[in-house]
Amino acid sequence: MAMLRKWVIFLVTITWCTHSFGQSADPELTENIEIGLSTETITITSDFSGADLTIFGAVDNIDPLLMRQGRYDIVVVLEGPSRNIVVRKKSRVLGIWINTNATSFRNVPASYLVSMTRNPQDITDDRSYKQLALGADNIYIEPINENGDKRTIAEFREALRATKKSGALYSERVGGVQYLSSNLFRASLALPASVPLGTHKARAFLFKNGRFLKETSDQLHIAKSGFEQAIYRTAQDYGLIYGFLAVLLAMATGWLGRIIFQRD
Amino acid sequence: MGIYLPIAEVSVNIFVLLAMGGAVGFLSGMFGIGGGFLITPLLIFYNIPPAVAVATGANQVIAASFSGAMAHLKRGTLDVKLGGILLIGGIAGASVGVYVFSLLRALGQLDLIVSIMYVVFLGIIGGLMLIESIRAIQRSRKGGSSSLKKPGQHNWIHKLPFKIRFRKSKLYVSAVPVVGIGAVVGFLSSIMGVGGGFIMVPAMIYMLKVPTNVVIGTSLFQIVFVASFSTIVHSHTNQTVDVVLAFLLMIGGVAGAQYGAKVGQRLRGEQLRALLAALVLAVGLRLAFDLFIEPANVYSLSVLQAV
C-alpha cells in the first residue's frame, strides 16, 4: 500500500526583530524572506514511495500594491547532499552494450527540487538564474579532471542532469509556491521515493519585479527510520559483524525450516 | 505490500519476493539443486542492483544448504574429509573472487561481467543437461538401462600426485583436482552469488568419480562454508549484503522446497532434468537478450568509489 504522507513544516516568523530601527524608516529597502523548519529531521519509513513536503515561510515589509499585482516571486529549493558522481556511457561493442566512457564530477547535489510561484522565465531572466546558480540547469557541475575534452564534459554533464530529471531527483514545480495571505506563503516539493539521505539545504529566493532581492536558507536532515537505518548503519560501519550475523540468520532459518517441516 | 530494502535502497513488493523465493525453493526441492543460479538473475530482472543481488544470493544460499547438509550428516552421506579439502580450494577461490568483484565494481564493468558469466554458464549447463536428458529419454524408450556411472574407469586425473584416501567416498585420488574444483566453485560463488552445486555435483561425479550417494551431501557441506565466507567478505569489503532481502527469499525458499520435494518424487528423472534444462536455458536467454538490446538510457550514474 502506497501511503502518501504529507509533512508540514511550520514557519517561525520572527522576522520583525531582524531589522534595526533605523532601517525601518525606509520600507522600500527592507523586504525580507524567512523560512523556518519546525523539525530538523525527517525520517522515511520502509514503505516510503515518495511524498509531498510542504515548507511554510513569510515575506515582510513588502509593498502591498506590488504584492496585489503579483510582482513578488518566490523560488524555494531543496538541495540534497553533494556526492562525487561517475557518469558512464554504454556503447555497442560486438553487439553487446558495454560501459565504454566515463567522466567523474565533483560535489554533485544528489537531488535538487525546485518549487516556484510562476514559470521560471516570468520570474527573472536567464542571466540572474546563472548568477545565482539557481535551477537544475544552472547549478555548477564541475568535472574532477578539468583538463578533459570540453565537448565530452558538456555531453556527460547534460546526461547527468537528464538522468537525474528522469528519476525525479531534479525536479521543478511551477506554481508550487502559493501565497496564503499577503505575507505568508507555502511551498510544496515532490520528494521522490529515492530521495537521498543526509543533510539537505532548504533555500528560498525572493524576487521583486524580476530582480533578485534576498535569500534565506535552513537545513533539513532526511534519515531512514529506526529499523532500516540500524541495518544500513551496521552494514556500513560494522561490515564484518554484519556479515557474521547474516550468516547466522541464514543458518537459523535453514535449521528452523528443517524442524518445522521435518525434512529427512 | 511494499517494503524498503535498506541495502539495495529500493522499495519492492514483499509478496513478489516471497513468491520468488518460494518458486525457486520449489524447483530446488524438486530437482535437488541450491537455486542460487536462478535467484540472482531473477533479482536482477526485478531491478535489484547486481552487486546487491550477487552478495545477497550468496547469503540466501546458506539457509537451504545448511539444512540440507545437516540432513546428509545425520544420514551419514557426507564425506567431511573430502568436503574439507574442497573447502581449502573454495576459500582461496572465493577470496580471489571477492577481490575481482570489487575491482570490476570500481571499473563499472561488474553488471556486464556478471551477466556474461551467467549467460555462459547457464547456456553450457542448460545445453548439456538438455542433451543428456533427451538421450536418456530416448534410451529409456528403447528399453535400455540409464546408468550414468561406470565404476573402475580411470582417466588422467588419477595420475596426478598428492594422492589422499577418502574412506567414506571409497576413493584414492590426488588432492590437486579436489582443491582445483573447490577453487573454481568458490570463485563463482563470490562473483555470481551461487552455491555452485550445479558445477560441483557434475565435476565430482564425472571427474573425481565420487559415489553419487555422498556427492550431494559433501557438495552442500562445502557450499555452506564457501557461501558463508563469501557473505562475510562481501559484507566487509562491499557492504552489499541485504539481510532483509535475503531473509524474505529464505522464508519463501524453505517453504517452497518442501512442496517441490514431494512433487519431484512423483515425476520421472529424465523428464525432470529436461524440464530444468529448459528453464535454465530460458533464464540464460533472457539475460543474453538484455545484453544485446539498446538500453533506454545509455548513460548511468554511480557514486564515485576509490579503487
Image (cartoon, rainbow, N blue to C red):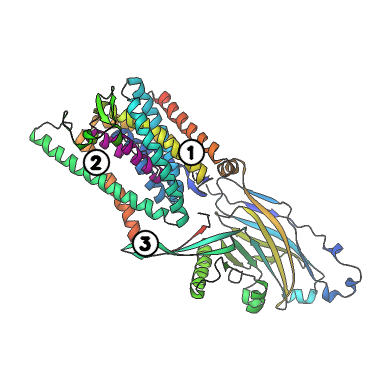
Q: Which mark lies nearer to you, 3 or 1?
A: 1
Q: Position of residue A197 (x, y in %)?
A: 60, 52
On residue A97, the disc is 3
| Numbered range of the magenta stretch | B177-206
Q: Nearer the viewer, mark 3 or mark 2?
A: 3
**Label 2 amino acid?**
Leu
Q: Nearer the viewer, residue A203 or B92?
A: B92
* Chain of the residue under the numbered disc 1 shown in the image: B
Q: Residues within 10 Å of mark 1 (few under 14, many from 20)?
A: many
Relative vertical location of residue A255 with respect to residue B277 in this rendering, above or below: above
Q: Which residue is mark 1?
A: B232
Q: In terms of secondary structure, where does tag 2 sit?
A: helix
Q: Which residue occupies 62% across, 44% down?
A: A225
Asked if both marks, 3 and 1, belong to the same chain, the answer given is no
Which residue is identified by label 2? B275
Q: Is residue A85 above or below residue A232?
A: below
Residue type at the position of mark 1:
Ile
Q: CA–CA distance between discs 3 and 1? A: 32 Å
Residue type at mark 3 is: Trp
Disc 2 is attached to a residue of which chain? B
Left or right of B9: which side holds B160? left
Chain of the residue under label 3: A
Name which quarter of the figure residue A216 lies in: bottom right
